[in-house]
Image (cartoon, coloured by chain):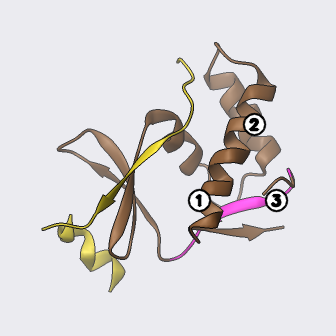
């Protein structure tokens, strides 16, 4: 998922939930799930089909001040690729 | 906020199953 104009959206079978016991966010899908760290959660919350990857990078660059936009772009694309490989994303263009 | 590389831990559903209603 390297096209920065693509608008990633979580697949219909995927839910982002907050686990009050662990204080972590979970990406839940049938029979399994992913416990996300804070940065992964920030990215997953933007996967609404409304944000382009460029928009995500701009938004996250304003939220995090200890990292370059290029680094954020690399990490966002890498994380979205992992989600896409697991079938957890659909791409809107 | 401090940026850290996005990461996750894979978990298997266990009696988390309270969320199963979402998938009906």
- Of the chain colours in the picture, the one used for chain A is brown
Q: Are the residues under marks 2 and 1 on the same chain?
A: yes
Residue at image x 21%, y 45%? A20
Question: Looking at the rendered structure, which numbered label has been put on residue A15?
Answer: none
Residue A56 left/right relative to B23: right
Circle 2 sits on which residue? A74
Q: Residue at x 26, y 76 (%)?
A: B20
Question: What label does residue A83 carry, if any?
Answer: 1
Disc 1 versus disc 3: nearer the observer = 1
- Tell me the residue at 44%/45% (across/down): B8
In reply to whether residue B9 is colored magenta, the answer given is: no
Q: Which chain can be seen in yellow?
A: B
Q: Which residue is mark 3?
A: A6
Which region shows up in magenta? A4-12
On the same chain, marks 1 and 3? The answer is yes
Please identify, in this view, whether the residue under mark 3 or under mark 2 is nearer the observer. 2
Q: What percent of the width, then of the height, locates residue A2?
A: 83, 53
Closer to the N terminus: mark 1 or mark 3?
Answer: 3
Q: Which of these two is toward me, A63 or A87?
A: A87
Q: Secondary structure at mark 2?
A: helix
Q: Which quarter of the figure has residue A8?
A: bottom right
**Is A3 above or below relative to A36?**
below
Q: Name above or below for residue A46 compared with residue A16.
A: above
Mark with earlier residue (2, 1): 2
Image quadrant in which you'd find residue B24: bottom left
Please state the horizontal and vertical placement of residue A35, each as a whole percent of the image.
37, 49
């Amino acid at each position: 998922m390297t096209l920065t104009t693509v608008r990633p959206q979580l697949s219909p079978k995927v839910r982002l939930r907050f686990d009050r016991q662990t204080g972590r966010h979970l990406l839940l899908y049938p029979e399994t799930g992913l416990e996300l760290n804070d940065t992964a959660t920030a990215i997953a919350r933007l996967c609404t089909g409304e944000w382009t990857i460029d928009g995500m990078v701009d938004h996250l660059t304003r939220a995090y001040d200890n990292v370059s936009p290029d680094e954020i772009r690399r990490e966002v694309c890498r994380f979205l690729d992992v989600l896409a490989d697991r079938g957890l994303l659909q791409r809107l263009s | 906020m401090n940026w850290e590389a996005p990461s996750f831990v894979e978990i298997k559903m266990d009696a988390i199953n309270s969320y199963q209603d979402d998938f009906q």
